[in-house]
Amino acid sequence: MSGPVIDYRVVFQALPGAAALLTPDLVFADVNEAYLLLSGRERARVVGRFLFDVFPDNPHDPAATGVRNLHASLRRVTATGERDTMALQRYDVEDPERPGEWQERYWSPVNVPVLGPDGEVVLLLHRVEEVTELIRARGIRDSGRTRALGAELYSRARELQDVNERLRRAHAREREVALHLQAAMLPVLRPPGDHRAAVRYRPAAGALNVCGDWYDLVDLPEDGRTSVAVGDVVGHGLRAAGVMGQLRSALSAASRVAVGPAQALEVLDRYARSVDGAENTTAVSVFIDWAERTLAYSSAGHPPPALCGPDGSVAFLDAATDPPLGARPEPAGRPQARAAFAAGSVLVLYTDGLVERRREDIDAGLDRLARSLARHRRAAPGPLADALLADLVPPAGLTDDTALVVLRL
């Protein structure tokens, strides 16, 4: 027996708590009746208008921070796709019946992302509870004690807000330093031989989840092969950037003397066991034999490279996958597989930030990549790399950093 058909617009309007839906540009898309009642506004004067045009700061209070704090919270939610619970806020509201007169009001806000099918933030749910009565208790018998308690609560909330802002600024500085370090340690692309290649690195949007991804291309002129690899360090920030630099350099060196990608990853696995923070790093290595038109590949727990033929058929190289680096109690040999390619094919290596989305099976991301790669396969490597990013990166940005290598075979 099927359940009742639920009209979620009616449910939204019936919610007992005050809630508003905002676009990512902070324009009111809808508000419920509780929100209108609490704010003292009519629907026609709210919906379709910019949030801070409807509710500006109190112009008579030079210390007002309501707009700044709320704007910062909503921007974080848009950038990260994660909910943000704000500290207690003083946010005065103009009396709708007495223009120019402002009411001292206190609020407890929560901002939540509403995600679209591709994981992008399409709306922001802004929910508020008024706590003015708690802060400015109207009791007579023990009003002094309750007022003191309210003042203390508000003071502690302001301190928490200030601490959070200082932490966010510190995180932003660390992120900037880590990105500079990342850029310095990634190799400058020199297309191997006469073959065309493009690389891209994109950091996560508005987050510290950056600087663990790397790429590497090594031309092996003595035997006419090229080694290409990507990897992803668990962790983020300066520490991940440091570990990334060590592992990239180690794999690059190993690839120059290894007989194939499996041996190169075996050497890297042994080295990673001596590097703090390298545990469970994923990596994939591909050796391209241009003369025989074959690919030898091996993966340490990494998403499979994509090989697109001239006819648009896409195959994922997933026949030689093993656990990430250091995941086994003891080092062991790693598998290796081979695949033939036709002239004019395209090889794409990437890290998981390109294909993974919250609450979505990885196969959906791989399908998106295959469709985009087939559609743009005739483009040169640089434009092709940009097209893949345009198709696969959500409008709200990446939640994990991403490395991408495109080679025309």
Image: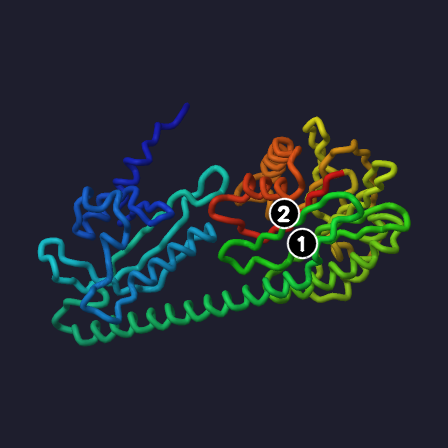
* Quadrant of the rendered image containing residue 197: top right
Q: Amino acid at mark 2?
A: Asp
Mark 2 and mark 1 lie on one chain; the one further toward the N terminus is 1
* Side (left or right) of 375 relative to 307: left
Residue in the picture at 60% in, 61% down: 236
The percent position of residue 239, horizontal first and vertical second, equals 63, 66
| Residue at the disc numbered 1 | 232
| Residue at the disc numbered 2 | 352
| Disc 2 element | helix
276 or 287: nearer the viewer:
287
In the rendered image, the vertical position of residue 85 relative to residue 259, given as above or below? below
Q: What colour-coding does the image apply?
A: rainbow
Q: Label 2 neighbourhood size at 10 Å, few (<14), some (14-19), many (20+)?
A: many
Evaluate whether residue 241 shows in this view. yes
In the orientation shown, which residue stands out farthest toward the top? 1
Residue in the picture at 28% in, 74% down: 152
Evaluate whether residue 300 shows in this view. no
In the rendered image, the vertical position of residue 81 relative to residue 341, given as above or below? below
The percent position of residue 285, horizontal first and vertical second, equals 77, 48
